[in-house]
Image (cartoon, rainbow, N blue to C red):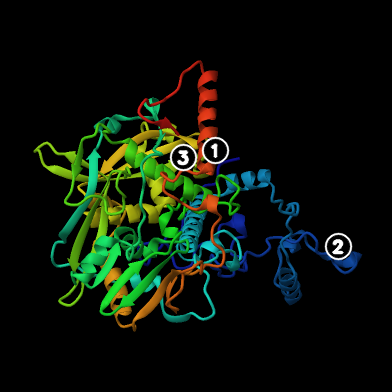
Amino acid sequence: MGFDLGVVPSNPDGWGPPDVPVIPQSLGGGASIPFAPFSRSDKLGRIADWTRNPAGPAAFAAASRDSVFDFTSADDSLIAGAEDSSFRLVDAKPPPRPQRFGPKWRFNQRQQLPQRQDEEVEARRRLAEKERARRDRLFQNNRSHHHPNFRFNQPLNSAKPSVDIQPDWTMREQIPFANFTKLSFSVADQPEDLLLCGAVEFYDRAYDRLNPKAARRLERFKSRNFFKVTTTDDPVIRRLAEEDKATVFATDAILAALMCTPRSIQSWDMVVQRVGNKLFLDKRDGSQLDLLTVNETAQEQLPENKDDINSAHSLAVEATYINQNFSQQVLHRNGEKVTFDEPNPFASEGEEAASVGYRYRRWKLNDEISLVARCEVHAVNVDPSGGRQFITLNALNEFDPKITGVDWRQKLENQRGAVLATELKNNANKLARWTAQALLAGADMMKLGYVSRVNPRDHYNHSVLTVMGYKPRDFAAQINLNTANMWGIVKSIVDICMKFEEGKYVFVKDPAKPQVRIYEVPSDAFENDYVEEPLPEEEQVRPLGEVDATAEEMDAVAEAEANNASSANGGEGEKSPDATVA
C-alpha cells in the first residue's frame, strides 16, 4: 500500500490556485457537499445526530449509515432550531452559603478580595473614621465653648447664675460672644503711672531650679493680710476721681475678667455704676471674681456637692489659698523690700500686709474717655544690667491625677509642655486672666508655680513641685490672647454703658449660653444683705490674718496630720524653719 500524496491542482490560466478547487476522491470526488458560510460570532451547529429515529423498521433499513450527517431536510432544521432555543446552561455548583457576620467570616472574605479592591475598602474605611473623628471633635468643641450643660448631659436648669436675677430688674442689653470675637481696638499711647503704693520683696531665684524630686512643702502665712478691695472702696481711686484724672475706673481683676469674657464658661458678674460723667466697674462682696476657678473649661464637670473636697466650690477656695500662700513663699523674707511712693492704702498701722505693689495706671481710649485701673505686682527682681523688673506670681494646683489624666510628679521632669498643654485646655480662662493682669500691670515676667497635694485625699497639705517663668507678651501669643481684641471688648462695653442714664447696672454672664446680659438694678441693690442666699460664714473667703476659731481648728488639724506623718516616716519631711507648714 503506497502513500497517497493527493492531487495537486494546476491553474493553466494564471498564477495561484484555480477558482474551483479540485476535491480529492477520498473526500467524495466531485460529489455535491453542502456548505454554509459562517462567521466566528455565529453559534456552531451539530456535526452528527445519532439520536434520530427513522419512522419504522423499513425506514430504518433503508436509511444509510451516513444519514446521521444529512441535515438537508426542513424538518431537521426546524427541530434543531427549536432545540437550540430551549437550550439552557445547567450550573452544577452547590448553592452559596448564607452570609455570616462573625469575625471568622470577615477574615476569610477579606482574604478573598482582590488586592486593589481591598485597598479601596481600607481607604474608604480610613476616610470614614477620619470624618467621624472630625465631627466628634467639632461637636465636643462646640459643646465645650458654647453649651457646657449639654456637654455634661445635664438639663439647662442645673446651671445657676452667679447672682439671683430679681423680678424688678430691667434687661438693657444682651450681647452674644460672637460679637466680642470680632472686636478690635488699639490703645494709641503707652499707659501712664499716676501713683505707686505698697512694698514688694525680691523673688527667690532658687525656686527656678525646683523639680518634683526636690519639692518643697507649701507654707501657710497666717500673719500676712491679703486685700481684695473693689473699685469704689479704694481711697486712692476716690481721690483720683475727685481730681478728675479719668472717666472710667476699675481694677485689673475686673478688667481681666471683662477682656477674657469669650473664654469663660461659668457664670460671673460685675457691678457698673454710672455717676455723673464717670463710670465705675465694681464687684460685689463675696463675688465669684474673688475665687479662682478650677477645671472651668475641662470636658468633665466637677461635682456640685460642697461637702466633697473635689467639688467646684471647694477647689476654688483651695486654689485661692494656694495662690496667696505661693505668692509669699517664693520671696526673700529677709526684710529687704522695695517701697513705693505711698504705703499700702488698705493696711492699717502696725498691720503686716502681703508683698503687693499697686500701680495706678491710666490709658487713653479716645479724646474724651480715659481709663484708670489699679494693677498688682507681687515681687521685684534685678536684671543682669542692674534694672528693676516687676513680677507677677500665680499658682496652678493639682488635686487628683486620675481626674486630669496627667501626673505632675512624673511629667514635669521631662514633659513640661504636656502639663502646660493640659492646663491650657482645662483652665484656659484662668490662665488668660492672669496673662491679661500681667499685661495691664506692665510686668516684665510672670511666674507660674505648680502646686500639688501631698495626698489626693488631703486638701490641707501641698507641695511646690516647680516654677516656670514666661514673658507676658510671649505667653499671650502662645495661648492666642489678642491684646487688640481685649481692648476692643473693654471699649465696646464702656461705650454701651456711657449711653445709659445715671444709676446702677449689673453685667452678668449667662450660665448656660455664650452671652452676657446687662440689667438695670435699684440703687440700693447688693446693700444690707440684698443677696437672698449668702454663703455660709465658714465658706466665705476672708483674709488669712483674720484667724477665728474655725481657722485655728483647721490649722491644728493640719499641723497634727503633718506631725503624725513626720513621726511615721522617722522624722523625714519637707519643712521650712521660717514659717508654719501648711
Q: In the image, is residue 208 above or below residue 156?
A: above
Dot in front, 3 or 2: 3
Q: Secondary structure at mark 3?
A: loop
Q: Amino acid at mark 3?
A: Val
Residue 440 screen position, x and y as percent: 24, 57
Between 489 and 306, which is closer to the camera in this rendering?
Answer: 306
The image quadrant that residue 491 belongs to is bottom left
**Which badge, 3 or 2, is on the more N-terminal residue?**
2
* Left/right of residue 375 with respect to residue 49 in the rendered view: left
* Residue at numbered disc 3: 406
- Mark 1 surroundings: few (<14), some (14-19) or many (≥20) residues within 10 A: few
For the C terminus, the quadrant is: top left
Q: Which mark is residue 61?
A: 2
* Residue at numbered disc 1: 553
Q: Amino acid at mark 2?
A: Ala
Q: In the image, is residue 113 above or below residue 574?
A: below
Q: Secondary structure at mark 2?
A: helix
Between 200 and 205, which is closer to the camera in this rendering?
Answer: 200
Between 198 and 92, which is closer to the camera in this rendering?
Answer: 198
Q: Secondary structure at mark 1?
A: helix
How far apart, in angstroms, are the residues tagged by discs 3 and 2?
105 Å
**Which badge, 3 or 1, is on the more N-terminal residue?**
3
Dot in front, 3 or 1: 1
Proximity of marks 3 and 1: CB atoms separated by less than 8 Å: no
Proximity of marks 3 and 2: CB atoms separated by less than 8 Å: no
